[in-house]
Amino acid sequence: MPRRPRLAAGNLAYHVLNRRVGRLSLFETPSDYRAFETILAEAHAEFRIRIAAYCLMPNHWHLLLWPRRDRELSEILRWITVTHTQRWHVQHETTGTGPVYQGRFKSFPVQTNEHFLTVARYVERNALRAKFVRQAENWRWGSLWRRAQGNATLITWLSDWPIPPPRNWTRWVNQPERGEELGALRVSVQRGRPFGDEAWVNRMAKRFGLESTLRPRGRPRGS
């Protein structure tokens, strides 16, 4: 069965995820993390992509992007992954040994209301959820840490959000997600299901041919 075309419409926010092939380590040293952050800064400078939030984890990364025009998402992610793959092989002296990433990135569109805040929280809370830190803002390799430093030079390539975060944002990020909320997000990650109000999700699914992401998996039960 052919792959469904990648949704890359402009003026939508997207959660984007990709992993190292075989779930091996993608970032092993601080220089590995810094190298990817440099690529994000270059992507912003070259293409003006709006990077709302991000979190780099040892074998994968999460981005929350807000592209302006159609196909911008696919173009930027292609540039990011190709550039990172090339530089990663050079840095690790592994050129010619095969792919770095497991495949195409995963993504899902996000409604730019309180659901955007839910996804931003999910992204910025990743290291805390994995118990790498006790406070989410202490994870050095993410947008929450950058904003928490109060240094304008650290956030020059991070964008404003379509909806302002609450004043107690950092405290909220540090609060555990509800199981229902986390489950819904993980379904969107796995299936590319739009994340938002029910009416908006149905509208996006119909507009972009994503109806299959709304159906339960597996064969229907017999009567």
Image: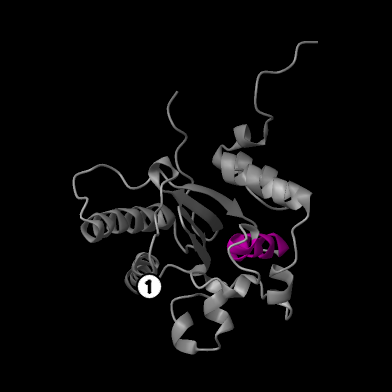
Residue 4 position (above or below residue 153): above
Q: Position of residue 79 (x, y in %)?
A: 32, 57
Q: Position of residue 131 (x, y in %)?
A: 62, 60
> Quadrant of the image for the N terminus?
top left
Q: How many marks?
A: 1
Which residue shows up at 69% across the image and 69% down it?
Answer: 173
Q: Position of residue 117 (x, y in %)?
A: 67, 65
Name the foreground residue: 114 vs 201: 114
Q: Is residue 96 left or right of residue 180?
A: left
From the image, give the main secondary structure of the stretch colored magenta. Answer: helix
Q: Position of residue 152 (x, y in %)?
A: 49, 88
Tell me the amino acid under the disc marked 1: Ala
> Based on the displayed image, in which of its 4 quarters is residue 210 positioned?
top right
Which residue shows up at 43% across the image and 56% down it?
Answer: 73
Q: Is residue 140 visible?
A: yes
Residue 120 forms part of the magenta stretch = yes
Which residue shows up at 50% across the image and 54% down it?
Answer: 16
Name the foreground residue: 164 vs 219: 219
The span picked out in magenta is 114-128
Residue 32 position (above or below residue 154): above
Q: Is residue 123 visible?
A: no
Q: Is residue 70 left or right of residue 134?
A: left
> Quadrant of the image for the C terminus?
top right
- Give the residue number, with chain letter if any, for mark 1: 41
Q: Residues within 10 Å of mark 1 (few under 14, many from 20)?
A: some
- Colour scheme of the picture: one colour
Which residue shows up at 62% across the image and 35% down it?
Answer: 211
Q: Is residue 184 left or right of residue 138?
A: right
Secondary-structure class at tag 1: helix
Residue 11 forms part of the magenta stretch = no
Q: Is residue 196 left or right of residue 161?
A: right
